[in-house]
Image (cartoon, rainbow, N blue to C red):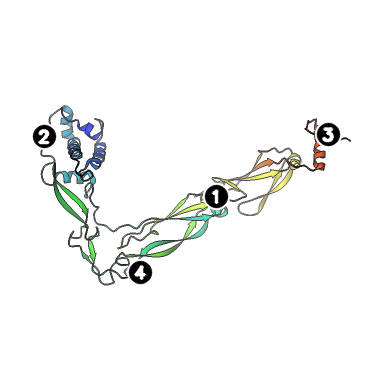
């Protein structure tokens, strides 16, 4: 029975060319002989996947295969570089496990955290962050070489930063591309390493930057400062600095996005007869709030435009005042007497006798 190449790659018969290519990448990584040394069955599966891709990726061969024609693939992967050329066409110049073309190494990104209070989060502020990092060496300017000593082209890779090795396998000669062990992929060697940084091109130091915290940030907001991260060394581009904001809680308010909640506790008399309170505002000062007679627990009073600034906008959210009526647990004799009289007037029943008089 003829091999079903669609089944080999795990794709439907109407799969697109890109889907076929993606499937071959997956199968090739799992079955490549370099990933399964000494496993003859994995090597056979890899060859079968390569054959399947060679047939299904070519429109004419695929039409013939779909018609049921017998396709002679003996010459498709044979000869020097056959499988290597296939892998480079799918995975790029470095092949399946190859090294990328020589280029400077980018420095690592750095994450620092900064705490701000709710007021600063509401209106924005400026904060200084400091952290240990690697910066370009001031002596060699990040080249890793002593001044005026320079660099020389690696004699083993000719400056390419990578070397190739051919080996025989079940399905012909394969090329493996790896980073040059002599220059570690740099393509150059330092004639005289910098004494200050020992040829690395960067040194440990404490860095500090001033960061603008925009109005309206919330906990978890990350600010990106491009190029402020760790040095790549050897003239590699620096990484980025990410500043993660943590907004501290404020006992006066609860935050809900751009809106704020202030919880106000009233006594029985205040809720029953009505009163006035000065409500704190996040930007300082207070706002008078009239509490009408008969206010119940759960009542909400809105103060528009006194919330947090909306991130990226000038508008502000609102301030909600949520009322809770406090019922005292320990009554003095005088308080108990007054409440008993009130209960009698209102015809309410209590667990205690109504005082005489």
The x, y position of residue 289, in whole percent, is 69, 46
Could you tell me which secondary element the residue under label 2 belongs to?
loop
In three-dimensional space, the C-alpha distance between marks 2 and 4, rounded to whole angstroms, equals 63 Å
Which residue, given by chain and number where applicable, does mark 2 sit on? 72
Q: Quadrant of the N terminus?
A: top left
Q: Nearer the viewer, mark 1 or mark 4?
A: 4
In three-dimensional space, the C-alpha distance between marks 3 and 1, rounded to whole angstroms, equals 55 Å
Q: Earlier in the sequence, mark 3 or mark 2?
A: 2
Q: Nearer the viewer, mark 3 or mark 1?
A: 3
Q: Nearer the viewer, mark 4 or mark 3?
A: 3
Could you tell me which secondary element the residue under label 4 belongs to?
loop
The x, y position of residue 321, in whole percent, is 64, 44
**Mark 2 and 4 residues: CB-CB less than 8 Å, in contact?**
no
Which residue, given by chain and number where applicable, does mark 4 sit on? 138
Q: Nearer the viewer, residue 159 or 2?
A: 2
Question: Callout 2 environment at 10 Å: few (<14), some (14 to 19), or many (20+)?
Answer: few
Which residue, given by chain and number where applicable, does mark 3 sit on? 354
């Amino acid at each position: 029975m003829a091999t079903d190449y669609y089944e080999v790659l795990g794709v439907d018969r109407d799969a697109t060319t890109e889907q076929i290519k993606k499937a071959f990448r997956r199968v090739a990584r799992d079955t490549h002989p370099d990933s399964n040394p000494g496993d003859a069955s994995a090597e056979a599966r890899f060859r079968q996947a390569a054959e399947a891709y060679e047939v299904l990726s070519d429109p004419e061969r695929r039409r013939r295969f779909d018609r049921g024609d017998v396709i002679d693939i003996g010459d498709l992967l044979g000869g020097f570089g056959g499988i290597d050329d296939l892998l480079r066409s799918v995975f790029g110049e470095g092949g399946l496990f190859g090294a990328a073309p020589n280029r400077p190494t980018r420095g690592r990104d750095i994450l620092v955290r900064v705490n701000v209070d709710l007021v600063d989060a509401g209106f924005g502020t400026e904060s200084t962050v400091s952290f240990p990092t690697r910066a370009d060496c001031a002596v060699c300017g990040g080249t890793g070489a002593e001044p005026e000593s320079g660099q020389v082209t690696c004699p083993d890779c000719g400056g390419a930063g990578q070397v190739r090795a051919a080996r025989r396998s079940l399905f012909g000669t394969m090329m493996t591309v790896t980073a040059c062990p002599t220059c570690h992929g740099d393509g150059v060697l330092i004639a005289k390493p910098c004494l200050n940084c020992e040829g690395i091109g960067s040194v440990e130091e404490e860095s500090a930057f001033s960061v603008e915290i925009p109005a309206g940030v919330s906990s978890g907001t990350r600010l990106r400062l491009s190029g402020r991260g760790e040095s790549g060394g050897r003239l590699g581009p620096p990484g980025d600095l990410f500043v993660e904001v943590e907004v501290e809680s404020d006992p006066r308010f609860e935050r809900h996005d751009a809106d704020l909640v202030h919880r106000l506790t009233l006594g029985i008399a205040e809720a029953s007869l009505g009163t006035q309170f000065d409500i704190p505002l996040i930007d300082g000062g207070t706002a008078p709030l009239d509490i009408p007679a008969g206010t119940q627990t759960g009542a909400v009073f809105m103060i528009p435009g006194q919330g947090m600034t909306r991130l990226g906008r000038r508008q502000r959210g609102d301030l909600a005042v949520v009322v809770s009526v406090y019922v005292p647990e320990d009554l003095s004799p005088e308080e108990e007497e007054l409440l008993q009289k009130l209960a009698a007037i209102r015809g309410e029943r209590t667990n205690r006798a109504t005082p005489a008089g």
